[in-house]
Image (cartoon, helix red, strand yellow):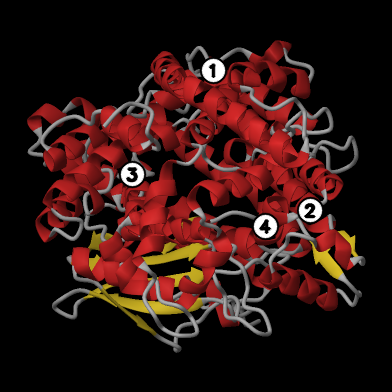
Amino acid sequence: MQPTYNPLLETFDEAPFSKIETKHYKPAILEAIKKARKEIDEIAGSKETPTFENTVAALDFAGKQLDRVTSIFFNLNSAETNKEIQQIAQEVSPLLTEFKNDTILNKALFERVKKVFQEQENLDLGVEEKTLLEKKYKAFSRNGANLPEEKQQELRKIDKQLSSLSLKFGENVLEETNKFELHITDEEDLKGLPESFREEAKSTAEDKGKEGWIFTLQYPSYIPFMKYIENRELRKKMAIAFGAKGFHGDELDNQENVLKIAKLRHQRANLLGFKTHAHFVLEQRMAETPEKVNDFLNELLEKAKPAAEREFAELENFAKKLDKINNLEKWDAAYYGEKLKQEIFNLNDEKLKPYFKLQNVIEGVFLVANKLYGLSFNEVFDVDKYHPDVKTYRVTDEYDEEVALFYADFHPREGKRNGAWMTIYKQQAIENGKNERPHISIVCNFTKPSKTEPSLLTFNEVTTLFHEFGHALHGMLANTTYPSLSGANVYWDFVELPSQVLENWCYEKEALQLFAKHYKTGEDIPMELVGKIKESANFHEGMATLRQLSFGMLDLSWHGIDPTGITDVKAHEDKAFEPTRLYPDVPENCMSTSFSHIFQGGYSAGYYSYKWAEVLDADTFEYFQEQGIFSREVANKFRENILSRGGTEHPMELYKRFRGKEPQPDALLKRAGLIPN
């Protein structure tokens, strides 16, 4: 009998999206696990004396097909999912966890790795090889290889449960986001909302076969609604719906999932000899310990809180003067913040959006990359894609050599989770003398084109595009030998540096002149508006900083303590938010139940890393400003020491080599206006 054709099991370079059917995923993953097991067993069972090449390097390249198949599957589970794909994810995740644990807990394999590790002083290893050896050894030792058999079985059980729970958490958040809609039939209720957003809401209603306007919890719908709608009761309704995801006491409720995930992570850390999950995670971060993270967050809190309280008082007085609002609530924040910003700077999204047509911004970020790193992006139409919205580009350098394949997916859909992220379909590595170039993707949720206008971005969406593209550059410019050290495979509190630093170009005249052109007339953005973008960059920076700190503190409140005594998710969260609270609490809302970054993504005990990386990015950009924002000399140093080096050395060593010194928080505090320039 002929084996059934499965495109995922064929040899391919570019992901064969058009040939893949949902039925192909599970058989392909099962077969790829089988093949990867065989590769691992061959390394573990080898009769040859363990060497770096036949054990450590071989292990890094093992399971390549499994990596490719699962990267396609799980990326689509985020960007283009459905019930069938979610069901498959629930079925295969425990199997993948089991395979991972079988590898980590393979005694013969660990003995070989340990032997190489113990003899490293006698081996002639380069920096990258030493880093890989340490990483591989720690992957075993930190994940139970030294535990007795019964403890290893316990670890396996915990990992399976965690894998399933985090998937369920994410599915619930997605379903909650998709199921809510605010249907408006009275045009009076749209007062304050600009025409372009009305048109988008009308189009959403038409797509659903309804009259009037429909608003959803997807960011391009939710954020303008909260910023512009005058009807306070409707803003309240939307805000409560947004903040109550996973907190309704129904089948999509995530409270139990949150408690179970936090407690299982703690149990796992204890089993491995760590005090808390945060102690386990931070051992392999620049920050090193929860104590250091707490000190870092509290130092910023001390600097930001007085400014945040002043800004909040100013906003309260403004709302009272404008609309006799006595008690400012969370659903007032964006609305009055936007009104005050307009009054102070005479600047709003409606003035800016005509200059930020999506296509122009894409070309703009490509131009910035060209000026800094000599890259060219050519759109191609012969590459398979998983949805018609996806754009594909071949990336080349100044010598016309291939650098990467780049996918970009910009607009919201029902099968796509909220937010924006970078992902990888093929990792860069040097194998058999060939430098395999990476396939990188960014996924966003930007305002769609309407019947009368192209996709016009808010300024926040412009910075989001630059942010994700910064991550993409980290992946594209990777130039390492081993896949697990390539591109964004770096310490988690270092990974945001390339993304956050690129956002700075959005505020600079020299960069804006490249792409900020009126979508109708083609005229450059007026210098007066550029000045206002720059001036308003620090608007309510104290409150924005406090908000980020509150998320970092909430994360550590779950992961930096023993959570076994926590029974009430909301009460625990309220206590964690106390030092950063400005607005009254909303009893119907709970952030933890939809905090996907820490309960589904990889940010558990790591949310602080956004602020940590801001220190690095402000310090980095200060260097660019000193030499010129398009200085090829500084860009080359950044490329050679940061972007191309991935995780081949400790990030502080790489950073010091680039900058000549350790980063100073003063650059961030000055940029944020929290200390004098």
Q: Which residue is mark 4?
A: 224
Q: Which residue is mark 1?
A: 560
Q: Amino acid at mark 1?
A: Gly
Front tag of 4 and 3: 4
Instruction: State the residue in front, 460 or 267.
Output: 460
Crowd rating for badge 1 (residues with CA inside 10 Å; few <14, some 14–19, many 20+): many
User: Real-space Cα distance between discs 4 and 3?
Assistant: 28 Å
Q: Amino acid at mark 3?
A: Leu
Q: Which residue is mark 3?
A: 497
Mark 4 or mark 3: whose residue is earlier in sequence? 4
Total labels drawn: 4
Q: Is mark 1 in CB contact (under 8 Å) with mark 4?
A: no
> Can residue 436 be seen?
no
Picture coordinates of residue 206 (x, y %)?
84, 78
Front tag of 1 and 4: 4
Instruction: State the residue in front, 589 or 336.
Output: 336
Front tag of 3 and 1: 3
Instruction: State the residue in front, 549 or 518.
Output: 518
Mark 2 or mark 3: whose residue is earlier in sequence? 2
Picture coordinates of residue 544 (x, y %)?
52, 36
Mark 1 or mark 2: whose residue is earlier in sequence? 2
